[in-house]
Image (cartoon, rainbow, N blue to C red):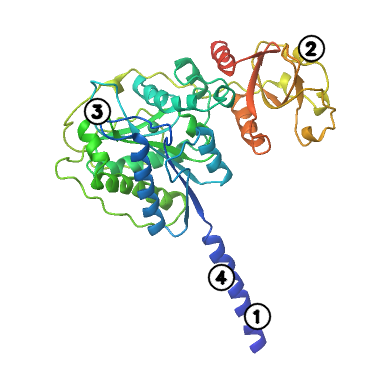
């Protein structure tokens, strides 16, 4: 009898140990303070975006560490250093993060005044103002050497480049929008003007593979806003708003109860809930907060642009380009071209290696890769690619996977067997759709 109950005790203990272990599975949050080092971000009269972002991000991390025991915080930077956008995303991807929060500060050209906080998820912009924010934030890639190759020829200042976001399918959209809305709700409660949840083509969000948002704390170019962004109360309330939004997210998506922290609403600024989402209206979670009074200081009426229907569905895979076996390695460029030339539908591949000589099919650098082929593009070197599809999203996924082994892997496009830029290929695909 004693023996038997001992057995039960052991089983119960084991069960508890495993139960506790599975409950204690860490939730990994990556906090990404935008800019840093020689990249100051937007500049105000007396302060720089990079410093505001870092101060708020560190305060946010402190709140998370204090109140969320099961959340591991990883920062992309904790000091004033320059980190390329791709590296920021890599940090999150490598850590298998559950959530990515990028902290930024907004600015408008001289003479334009705006107030408030807004939060972005990845997608195609619907208003010109949102594209402007993405252009400004993406322009930092120009400070990285080799950015053209790393970002597939993306030119942050050209509107045409943003076509890639039209073809993107973001499987984390629902979660990202939920978080963005929650953060906006708490900004509102902190007395911030609520500039809503929007979508735009931010490269840093695009390179991550988990729910991700980018929040713009306020306008450094507006004098009162700059003062607020640099004040103790401002930093604390902005960080608390983001924190509370994350707490709400954890409750819904990680099933953990997390304490909300208090926000001290500024006596001067009453909550303003002028939410103008330009997101496609789907059945999303309702994160309503009481709509409130007046627009005190109404700035640019840039959200009123007519919205275009979003075409998020890329054409299906083309069967013609599917059946390429690894044995194709070593065949000539002409062979490749013939196969791809069967239609003028763009074909996407991941280029992962350049070799001065032709590699044998069993070369260890090519091992474990599917659909390997090689092209020369008129040059002397042999360029090796993996995968072959007309589905841009599929090739993006493959590229992210290959980056683990080949960090410099990038997407290349071919039309009629000729190498073209990814933007050109997507434009063609859009036209012929
Ligand atoms: Zn920024």
Give whichever of discs 2 and 1 has the lower sequence position: 1
Q: In percent of the image, x 52 and y 28: which residue is there?
A: 144
User: Is disc 4 placed on a helix, strand or loop?
Assistant: helix
Tell me the residue that label 3 is attached to: 114
Task: Tell me which corner region of the image, top left, top right, bottom left or bottom right, holds residue 79.
Answer: top left
User: Is disc 2 placed on a helix, strand or loop?
Assistant: helix
* Residue 257 visible to an observer of this rendering: no
Q: CA distance from mark 4 to mark 3?
A: 54 Å
* Residue 160 visible to an observer of this rendering: yes
Give whichever of discs 4 and 3 has the lower sequence position: 4
Q: Which labelled disc corresponds to residue 16?
A: 4
Give whichever of discs 1 and 4 has the lower sequence position: 1
137 or 16, which lies in front?
Answer: 137
> Callout 2 environment at 10 Å: few (<14), some (14 to 19), or many (20+)?
few
The percent coordinates of residue 30 (x first, y second) are 47, 45
Between label 1 and label 4, give the one nearer the viewer.
4
106 or 334, which lies in front?
Answer: 106
Q: Which residue occupies the extreme front position in the image?
A: 38
Tell me the residue that label 2 is attached to: 334
Task: Tell me which corner region of the image, top left, top right, bottom left or bottom right, holds residue 342.
Answer: top right
The percent coordinates of residue 269 (x first, y second) are 17, 40
The percent coordinates of residue 3 (x first, y second) are 67, 86
Between label 1 and label 3, give the one nearer the viewer.
3
Between label 2 and label 4, give the one nearer the viewer.
2
Q: Which labelled disc corresponds to residue 7?
A: 1
Compared to residue 2, the image places residue 71 above or below, namely above
């Amino acid at each position: 009898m004693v023996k038997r109950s001992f057995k039960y005790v052991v089983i119960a203990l084991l069960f508890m140990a495993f139960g506790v272990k599975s409950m204690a599975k860490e939730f990994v949050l990556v906090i990404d303070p935008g800019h840093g080092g020689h990249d100051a971000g937007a500049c105000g009269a007396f302060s720089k975006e990079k410093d505001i972002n870092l101060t708020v991000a560190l305060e946010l991390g402190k709140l998370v560490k204090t109140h969320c025991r099961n959340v591991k915080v990883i920062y992309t930077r904790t000091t004033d250093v320059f980190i390329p956008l791709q590296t920021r995303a890599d940090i999150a991807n490598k850590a298998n993060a559950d959530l990515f929060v990028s902290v930024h500060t907004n600015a408008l050209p001289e003479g334009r005044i705006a107030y408030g906080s807004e939060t972005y998820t990845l997608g195609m912009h619907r208003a010109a103002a949102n594209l402007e924010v993405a252009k400004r934030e993406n322009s930092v890639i120009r400070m990285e050497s080799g950015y053209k190759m790393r970002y597939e020829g993306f030119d942050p200042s050209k509107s045409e480049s943003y076509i890639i976001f039209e073809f993107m399918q973001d499987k984390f959209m629902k979660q990202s929008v939920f978080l963005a809305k929650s953060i906006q709700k708490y900004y509102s409660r902190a007395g911030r003007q609520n500039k809503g949840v929007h979508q735009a083509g931010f490269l840093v969000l695009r390179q991550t593979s988990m729910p991700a948002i980018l929040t713009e704390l306020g306008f450094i170019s507006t004098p009162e806003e700059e003062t607020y962004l640099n004040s103790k109360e401002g930093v604390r309330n902005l960080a608390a708003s983001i924190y509370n939004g994350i707490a709400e997210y954890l409750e819904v998506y990680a099933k953990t109860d997390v304490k909300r922290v208090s926000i001290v609403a500024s006596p001067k600024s009453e909550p303003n809930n002028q939410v103008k989402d330009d997101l496609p209206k789907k059945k999303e979670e309702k994160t309503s907060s009481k709509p409130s009074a007046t627009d005190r200081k109404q700035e640019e009426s840039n959200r009123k642009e007519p919205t275009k229907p979003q075409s998020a569905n890329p054409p299906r895979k083309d069967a013609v380009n599917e059946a390429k076996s690894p044995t194709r390695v070593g065949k000539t460029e002409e062979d490749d071209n013939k196969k791809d030339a069967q239609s003028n539908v763009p074909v996407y591949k991941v280029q992962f290696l350049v070799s001065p000589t032709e590699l044998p099919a069993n070369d260890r650098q090519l091992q474990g890769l599917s659909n390997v082929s090689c092209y020369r593009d008129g040059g002397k070197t042999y360029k090796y690619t993996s995968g072959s599809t007309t589905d841009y999203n599929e090739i993006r996924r493959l590229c992210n996977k290959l980056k683990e082994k080949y960090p410099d892997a990038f997407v290349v496009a071919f039309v009629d067997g000729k190498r073209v830029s990814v933007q050109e290929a997507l434009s063609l695909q859009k036209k012929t759709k």
